[in-house]
Amino acid sequence: MKKNLSIALLLALTLLMTSCSTSNDQDQITVGIVQLADHPALDAAREGFVDGLKELDVDVKIVYQNAQGDIPTSLSIAQKFANDNVDLIYAIATPAAQSAKQATKDIPILFSAVTDPVYSQLVESLDKPNTNLTGTSDESPIKDQLQIFKQLNPDIRKIGILYNTSENNSEIQINNAKAIAKELNLEIVEKGVSNINEIPQAMDSLVKDIDGFYAITDNMIASAITVISQKLNENKKISVGAEEAHVKGGLLITKGISYYELGKQTASMAKKILVDGLTPSDIPVEKAKTISTVYNENTLKLLNIDLNNDAFKDAVAVKEGEI
């Protein structure tokens, strides 16, 4: 009798603990992160987001999945998040955001590392998204960045751009760069690649026809930035990146955004949704609030460029590999 009573009490206690555990799991806010690929800029956008939530005391369970550059995989990840009914999806890079949008019209979605969310049909307008998506744009100050070439060498004329032919963000940036280049008496020499294996040969061809190189925020290009910088530095070509991870990967200089800070900026938007009760349609898309000048100390020495040049005013030095 006593033995049966003990077993019954043990079962009851187990059920109670399971019930409490399930209740706690249900109360836990869950954020699903779908990241398009592994490279320093997108990694920084994720790390900044996670750190930002911690700094804001937003207690969440993070479920992180990486599509490894495969768009169908990013869609499968987003659909799994939708089926699991997570509280919010954080999509890093345009294809990941488009996958998340396709997966759900109900769950709030925040995006980052998206150059033009209107052109990419993620929102109706920057001020009024009018959908279940909003987030942060990584649009670069292209004019400021192209002007750096003239500051470093007034005789520079031809600027090379390498890009992924299947990335919408790249098309937008190249068109903007061409328009701005005309104002600065520069010529854009563009070369497209369809996969990362084509990059070394494409760079060998491109460096023969250019005076300098401009790296746009293209995911494929970012993934191969060390290969690209090596080709440029071997040929003593001045290089300007759109963001600081390009410089940390070996390019000379940028006056651009920090993806880590952009991630933290997106985290503050997540708080508005998860804690304050706003919806994405209530929150305008934001552009990067932090712009800084960063240069690569090793590349500067290799190219024998004078640090007293105006381009380096208020600049911060990094060495290759400090990512």
Image (spheres, grey):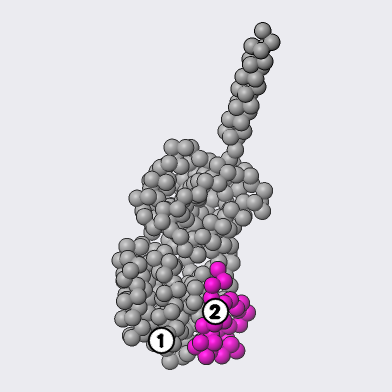
Residue occupying image coordinates x 51% and y 87% = 302
Q: In terms of image quadrants, where is residue 186?
A: bottom left
Gap in angstroms between the C-alphas marked 1 and 2: 17 Å
With respect to residue 55, does 249 lie above or below?
below
106 vs 319, left or right, is: left
- Residue lying at the far right in this picture: please name it: 2
Residues in magenta?
A: 295-323
User: In the visual, does 114 lie left or right of 29?
Assistant: left
**Foreground residue, 180 or 190?**
190
Quickly name the residue at label 2. Answer: 296
User: Which image quadrant: the C terminus?
Assistant: bottom right
The amino acid marked with disc number 2 is: Asn
Where is residue 57? Give x, y as percent: 67, 48
Instruction: Give the secondary structure at mark 1.
Output: loop
Q: Which residue is mark 1?
A: 235
Q: Mark 1, residues whose alpha carbon is within 10 Å: few (<14), some, or many (≥20)?
A: few
Relative to residue 305, is residue 199 depicted above or below?
Answer: above
Residue 121 visible in the shown view: no
Quick check: 163 above or below 68? below
